[in-house]
Amino acid sequence: MTSDVTVVREIDPSAQIAPDVTIGAYCVVGPNVTIGPGTVLQRRVSVMGHTTIGSGNTFQEGCVIGEVPQDLKYRGGMTLLMIGHANHFARRVTIHIGTETGGYLTTIGNENIFLDGCHVAHDCYVDDRAHLGRNVLLAGHIRIQRGAVVEDLAGVHHFVTIGRHARVGPRTPVRRDVPPYTNFYSDDQELTPPSVRGFNEAGISNANLTCDEEKELRLALVELFEDEAALQTKIEQLVNLGAEGEVAELCKFCQRSLQGVFGRYRERFRGQVPPETLRHISAERLAEIRRSQS
């Protein structure tokens, strides 16, 4: 007996989909979605909202992309999700659009990896080549900088920044900013809060620094984090000695975190449009979006 199986897909005719996009069985694509060349949606993937997806992305089974935020401040406005190129989203990854009070935008850059069950909430900004392990949960308004690694089952608090090429250990609760090029975890999470635990050697290697840049960076990391007491004074000393390049960026990151509420620099943007939004949306486009809300 031959089975007669009809593959069901729900694709809005007004969605803008490149000719070579692969869309599997039981997928749903909404009316305000744009999908670029070479992207693959495997089985049961839903892409909704005002969502723009670049080229060469893969979404494995059960992903839900561009849904409305789980945030009571969201008022149903035209907020956005922008996804770049060559990202890999494993099974059941969920990503939300932005909120009106958080900057109208969630962004994912290029060549990132999101493993099974990751959640990226509203108004988050993930740069390039980050790696999020299984069941990593990002609350709203988070920035994950280039090359950062967040290992399995870690949870990241609202408004936290995880620095360039940093590594967050598995099952780690992250409540404050994580400095670039560091390891951040706790040996005993029930008794000891997580903290900086040495260099992220893989991150330093992946940054492709020159020998002199790497040497200076390592010296600065030891100076700042071998003992975090008097961190402000140590930052000022490095700056006064003429810190440059990655060391200068490291000092700037740490200075901002110290000035932020609860060690979170991005708290200063609570209720405001953050600078990341203005890098992705022109002032004219932002004004148009705001007018559509009124």
Image: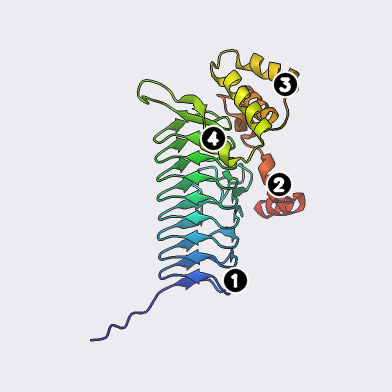
Disc 3 target residue: 239
Residue situated furthest left in the rendering: 1
Mark 4–mark 3 CB contact (< 8 Å)? no
The answer to which of 160 and 195 lies nearer the viewer is 195
Q: Is residue 142 visible?
A: no
Disc 4 marks which amino acid?
Ala
**Left or right: where 125 falls relative to 154:** right
Disc 1 marks which amino acid?
Ala
Quarter of the picture holding the N terminus? bottom left
User: Is 246 placed above or below 70 here?
Assistant: above
What is the CA distance from the residue labelled 4 to the residue labelled 3?
Answer: 22 Å
What is the CA distance from the residue labelled 4 to the residue labelled 2?
Answer: 23 Å
Disc 1 target residue: 18
What is the CA distance from the residue labelled 1 to the residue labelled 2?
Answer: 25 Å
Mark 4–mark 1 CB contact (< 8 Å)? no
Disc 4 target residue: 166
Please tell me which of labels 1 and 2 falls first in the chain.
1
Please give the count of numbered marks on the rendered protein.
Answer: 4
* Foreground: disc 4 or disc 1: 4
Residue 272 screen position, x and y as percent: 66, 38
Mark 2–mark 3 CB contact (< 8 Å)? no
Please tell me which of labels 4 and 2 falls first in the chain.
4
The answer to which of 38 and 75 lies nearer the viewer is 38
What is the CA distance from the residue labelled 1 to the residue labelled 3?
Answer: 49 Å
